Image: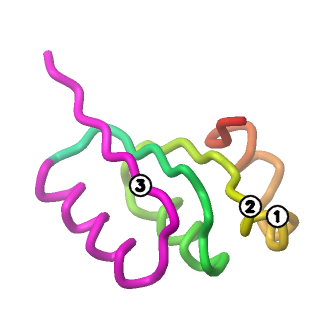
């Protein structure tokens, strides 16, 4: 069986919305996000999208790191 992974990075509100729509249309199995959210809300959207995902921290992400629970890191963070 073929597995589909969507790889995204440098997400901002409009591109993330489009990427999640595309992920649902294409029935991807997981999303790999290479970081650089422009706002913590992007992380929340990704967390609530219903698709398995993994995050890598980008250089703009450190400022909101404390807003995400430790269990979020152990389940989804790729370092």
Q: Residues within 10 Å of mark 2 (few under 14, many from 20)?
A: few
Write down the quadrant of residue 35 in the picture. Answer: bottom right
Left or right of 40? Residue 46 is: left
Tag 3's secondary structure?
Answer: strand
Write down the quadrant of residue 50 in the picture. Answer: bottom left
Residue where numbered disc 2 is placed: 59
Q: Residues within 10 Å of mark 1 (few under 14, many from 20)?
A: few
* Mark 3 or 2, nearer chain start: 3
Tag 1's secondary structure?
Answer: helix
Q: Residue furthest top?
A: 1
* Image location of residue 54, percent across then percent down: 54, 42
Judge depth for marks 1 and 2 and give the one in front.
2
Q: State yes or no: residue 20 in magenta.
A: yes
Per the rendered image, the range of residues in magenta is: 1-26
Q: CA distance from mark 3 to mark 2?
A: 15 Å
Which label sits on residue 8?
3
> In percent of the image, x 30 and y 65: which residue is there?
19
């Amino acid at each position: 069986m073929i597995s589909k992974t969507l790889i995204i990075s440098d997400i901002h509100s409009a591109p993330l919305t489009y990427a999640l729509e595309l992920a649902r249309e294409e029935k991807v199995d997981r999303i790999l996000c290479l970081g650089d959210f422009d706002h913590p809300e992007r992380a929340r959207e990704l967390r609530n999208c219903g698709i398995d995902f993994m995050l890598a921290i980008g250089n703009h992400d450190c400022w909101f790191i404390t807003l995400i629970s430790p269990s979020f890191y152990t389940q989804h963070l790729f370092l």
